[in-house]
Image (spheres, grey):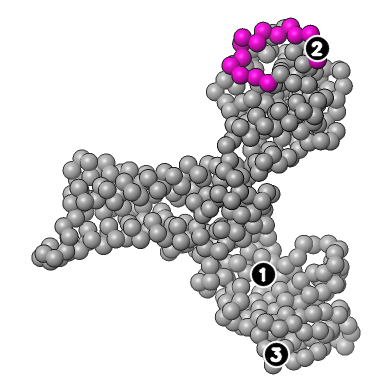
Amino acid sequence: MNDTIVAISTAYGAGAISIVRLSGDEAIDIANKSFKGKNLKQVKSHTIHYGKIMANNEIIDEVLVSVFKAPKTYTKEDIVEINCHGGAFVTQRVLEEMIKNGARIAEAGEFTKRAFLNGRIDLTQAEAVMDMIDAKTKESLKMANLGLRGDVKKLVNSLREKLLLCVAKIEVNIDYPEYEDEEQITNDVLKPLLNEVKDELEELIKKGEISQIIKDGLKTAIIGKPNVGKSSLLNGLLRENKAIVTDVAGTTRDIVEGRINIGGIVLNLIDTAGIRETNDVVEKIGVQKSLEEIDNADLLILVFDNSQVLDEDDKTILEKTKDKNRIIIVNKSDLTSQIDYSIFDDYLLISTLSEDDIHKVEKKIKDIYQMNEEEQIDATYIGNARQIGKLYEALKSINDALKGANDGQVVDMINFDIFLALKALGDIVGVNASESLINELFSEFCLGK
């Protein structure tokens, strides 16, 4: 990290402004070589200066340059941000000039990577940066902000401290048995401590499932036979005519997608081709895709026609989805009913043409996923898949330690499982993180961040 990096930190394309960011020991000197205005090497930290970026005595752009001197910066290195006019060509020219002056193009996420490696943030805070960029709802934004300010780090470190205390006491007992004043660590002493950590981990994992729904949304497939109103339901939920609606069965032959936010839950909606026996080659492909979506979706909305008797295709749909998270919709409530309702455990009778009935569907979805109100979301809601995976690892090791304690194993054997749990929790915040893990995580960031 001895070199100075540079990247465009704003979205590519035309806009009001663009920002070219530099970080490193030579950031100020490199920017100063092309800046006509105050001598940037002599200005105070955290100040902004008007001037021009020059190349061969020609003006590239009229700019504002912000100077931030280490260590009180995002990366804990000297940082310069050049605020250009927001044209793609002019921004590229400023970037090229910085490279000519000695900077290197930054890798994806390298600014945040340097912040981590220089000890300004831990891995949970680094991942929260991307979560903030990707946030789709107020709730997911709040979770990202909690992670960014270090609340998740404090939570994980609190668990680690409890386990470190166990490990320290066990090792003192093993290495210095002659210390009579030291508490003797037995299985009876360990079990309450381990159960306390176990309960906390289980609660975090339980909330993590909700958090991932808040963060990533639900892949929601609308399933049913042709012409039962699947596309009308999609259009009703989206409040736009996304899918083609006709009286001709089999109109939808491919996947149609849309996204809505219902009470903080993002639904990634998929309108599928009608499921039925068909000899049409193209429609067959659509039906096969629909069947695949049943396996892939987090939530299924099954749609049936109130005016039609249930047939074998309907029963196949019900059977294939019986173990899935599903909502049963009976559409066309304005038509004479021919359907046998006794086959359904629970259902909504609606008309997709009614705004009130669309609200009923939305309420049903919110009732199934009982989300806490926004103000109740705290650091215990961890929505990052990698972090949750590590919580599962830690819980497995704690359960192994408890089993050993219940089976009467010697404490130094139990200590090994506690150490594995400690390592898994350390992986969450980046304690002794491997170079390959760090590179993999930050490669998912955008350029300039």
Tell me where residue 330 sits by quadrant. Answer: top right
The disc placed on residue 106 is 1
- The residue range painted magenta reads 334-348
Task: Give the residue type at disc 2.
Answer: Leu
Q: Residue at x 84, y 84 (%)?
A: 52
Which residue is situated farthest in the right direction here?
Answer: 58
Q: Position of residue 139 (x, y in %)?
A: 63, 49
Quadrant in which the N terminus is drawn? bottom right
Q: Is residue 193 above or below residue 280?
A: below
Task: Give the residue type at disc 3.
Answer: Val
Q: Is residue 381 visible?
A: yes
Is residue 342 a member of the stretch shown in magenta?
yes
Task: For label 2, count other residues whose C-alpha is less than 10 Å away and answer few (under 14), some (14-19) or many (20+).
Answer: few
- Of labels 3 and 1, earlier in sequence is 3
Closer to the camera: disc 3 or disc 1?
3
Closer to the camera: disc 1 or disc 2?
2
Q: Is residue 423 above or below residue 263?
A: below
Task: Give the residue type at disc 1.
Answer: Ala
Badge 2 marks a residue whose secondary structure is loop
The disc placed on residue 74 is none
Q: Which residue, given by chain and number where applicable, does mark 3 sit on?
A: 43
Q: Which residue, given by chain and number where applicable, does mark 2 sit on?
A: 335
